[in-house]
Image: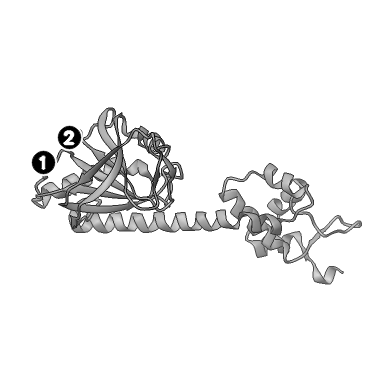
Amino acid sequence: MKNNLITAGEFARLARTTKRTVLWYDQKEIIRPKLVDSYNNYRYYQPDQIIDYQVILLLKKLNFSLSEIKKYLKKNKSLKDLFKEKRQLLEQEILTLKLALDSTENYYKNLSKTGTLVNPAIKQIKSFSIYCLDREGPYSKIGDYIEELRQCFYKFPQTATLLTIFETRGYQPKKAKMKIGVIINRKLELKKKANINKIIIPGFKALSFIHQGSSKLLSLLWMEVSKYAASNNHKKNTTFPFDDLEIYLYVGMERSPDNNGYFAEIIYPIV
């Protein structure tokens, strides 16, 4: 039987870890040897248990504790079963890391090309209609305001395009007048007694920069867009009753605005 098994030392070498780590997982009853020699107490493992070890490493990167993994195994389930259950989370983590890497690379490219973290495109925005709520408060509460907006509808499709119109001029993170809106489409079903406004946004020319990643970076990127506009002689259009706006291309905000599944388009009106 030992011919088909490997020692703890061989396991460690093939898994690129230490023998001490392998024995430690045995003590924790997470990766148990298939055979323990009663004469010399040597531990023997099946080669495919190396895959179990790799699964544990992946789960630890998703902030799973060893106690959580052990608790799962005590339910007579295998690490293979656990991997299948958590595969989507693992794939999302891989995607998040890749997107973070790509974003960082793009920031460096933009710095080399424009001297800022951004490289906006000039865009002609067509007129569009929105339902909106008027709110005054800190930028940090935009997510809460969006949830209030959602409650005004019987049906609010996942594909709905949300936005924030900033009416207060300049950077005012603590207290700003804003319109929290959604672009009108046929799938929206407004509640009859909803206290909400309907307005038309006229067409205009703007600098547009699409950000993918944490919403915590938006304030910094707004400042970078403003710096880009000044250094490239793009004059701010101040004829509108608002300063600028953000369009959320993939939301809701109640999902994860702090991860890389979040998209926002920074719209900076210019002459």
Callout 2 amino acid: Arg
Disc 1 designates what residue? 238
Mark 1 in CB contact with mark 2 (< 8 angstroms): yes
Taking the image as shown, residue 21 lies to the left or right of residue 44, namely left
Q: Residues within 10 Å of mark 1 (few under 14, many from 20)?
A: few
The answer to which of marks 1 and 2 sits earlier in the sequence is 2
Residue 128 against residue 80 in the figure, above or below: above
Residue in the image at 39% along x and 48% along y: 188
Residue in the image at 66% along x and 65% along y: 14
Q: Position of residue 18 (x, y in %)?
A: 66, 55
Residue in the image at 26% along x and 59% along y: 109
Taking the image as shown, residue 55 lies to the left or right of residue 111, namely right
Task: Find numbered disc 2 in the image and state the secondary structure of the residue it sits on.
Answer: loop
Q: Position of residue 231 (x, y in %)?
A: 11, 49
Q: Position of residue 65 (x, y in %)?
A: 64, 43
Q: Which of the 4 quarters of the picture holds residue 35?
A: bottom right
Disc 2 designates what residue? 169
